[in-house]
Amino acid sequence: MITFQQPPDALAPVSVAVMSQNIVDRMADKMLEMGMNGTAVTKESLFEHSDFTLEQIDQHGTEASNLARSRAVRQQG
């Protein structure tokens, strides 16, 4: 006999902590991308080149900047 089941809800509620972490990760990735393209990363340039609001940049910018620095690989030689 064939039975049908409902698939799990793909859009389940996400906690605020997970959402804020995603913002920090996305912001750090954008900062790295801008830096690799030769764009100076400032609050204003990040606002212009991304979908982050000024409030989000103020709230998460420092943490994202530190994460971006830790992800950056610099080779000297």
Image (tube, helix red, strand yellow):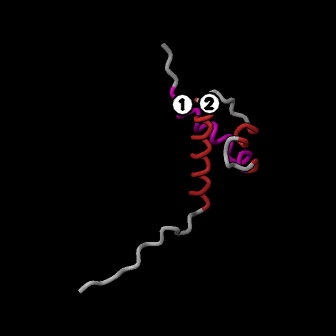
Badge 2 crowding class, 10 Å Cα cut-off, few under 14, some 14 to 19, many 20 or more, is some
Which of the pair 52/70 is nearer the observer? 52
Question: Which labelled disc corresponds to residue 35?
Answer: 2
Residue at 57 percent across and 40 percent down: it is: 29
**Which label's residue is closer to the chain start, 1 or 2?**
2
Q: For this view, does 72 lie left or right of residue 48?
A: left
Quadrant where the N terminus is found in the figure = bottom left
Could you tell me residue 52's position as x and y percent? 69, 49
Which of the pair 44/17 is nearer the observer? 44
Could you tell me residue 7's position as x and y percent? 41, 74
In the picture of the structure, the residue carrying the numbered disc 1 is 72
Q: Is residue 71 magenta?
A: yes
* Residue contact at pointers 1 and 2, CB within 8 angstroms: yes
Magenta stretch, main secondary structure, is helix
Does residue 75 sit above or below 10 in this rendering? above
Q: Secondary structure at mark 1?
A: loop
Which region is colored magenta?
Answer: 56-73
Residue at 63 percent across and 27 percent down: it is: 38
Could you tell me residue 13's position as x and y percent? 56, 68
Q: For this view, does 21 lie left or right of residue 55?
A: left
Residue type at mark 2 is Gly
